Amino acid sequence: MKIEIVCAGIILVAATLPAAAQRVPRSANEGLQVTSSFQTMLPVSSPMTLQEEAKASETARQALYEVASRECEVISKVFKGECRLMNINVNSYVQDRGNGLRGLQVSVNATYRIAPANE
């Protein structure tokens, strides 16, 4: 059974800035911390071998890692500073949704540090 996951089909459900990061006063030299979350659900063909599920999960995780990596570009433009990815956490699992429907759930949480741009 051949499985194809198209990166363009990944849906970003959430990309949010924590409210606390916007409200806490910070010194100009301290910078800003931003946390973003990305997730997707892809249909899984049944039955799949464990190896096929693992490969599909790997492909989906790689796509979300790439999204998380590009987020620094967006953050740098908005906050006018130098962005660095500080922490990333990924979760993936196959979920049985009933009636023979299964989906691969993948989520990534990433924390970035934005240092003020050198002038």
Image: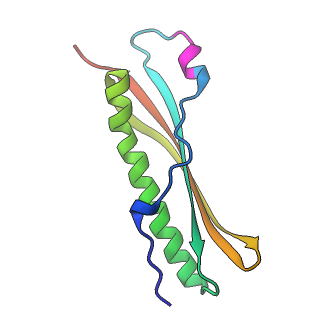
Q: Position of residue 70 (x, y in %)?
A: 35, 44
- State whether the magenta stretch is mostly helix, strand or loop: helix
Q: Farthest residue in the bottom direction? A: 1
Q: Position of residue 51 (x, y in %)?
A: 55, 83
Residue 28 lies left or right of residue 15; in this view the side is left
Q: Position of residue 94 (x, y in %)?
A: 65, 70
Q: Is residue 37 above or below residue 3?
A: above
Numbered-mark total: 0
Bounds of the magenta segment: 21-25
What residue appears at the point 43 percent right and 47 percent down from the top-left corner?
A: 68
Pick whichever, 43 or 30, lies toward us. Answer: 43
What residue appears at the point 45 percent right and 9 percent down from the top-left corner?
A: 27
What residue appears at the point 60 percent right and 87 percent down from the top-left corner?
A: 49
Q: Is residue 73 magenta-colored? A: no
Residue 113 lies left or right of residue 100; in this view the side is left
Identify the image quadrant of residue 54: bottom right
* Residue 28 in sight from this viewpoint: yes
Identify the image quadrant of residue 74: top left
What residue appears at the point 59 percent right and 76 percent down from the top-left corner?
A: 44
Q: Farthest residue in the front direction? A: 99
Name the colour scheme: rainbow
Name the quadrant of the C terminus.
Answer: top left
Q: Is residue 74 above or below residue 101?
A: above
Q: Position of residue 9 (x, y in %)?
A: 45, 62
* Residue 82 in sight from this viewpoint: no
Q: Farthest residue in the left direction? A: 119
Q: Is residue 91 above or below residue 1?
A: above
Q: Is residue 24 magenta-colored? A: yes
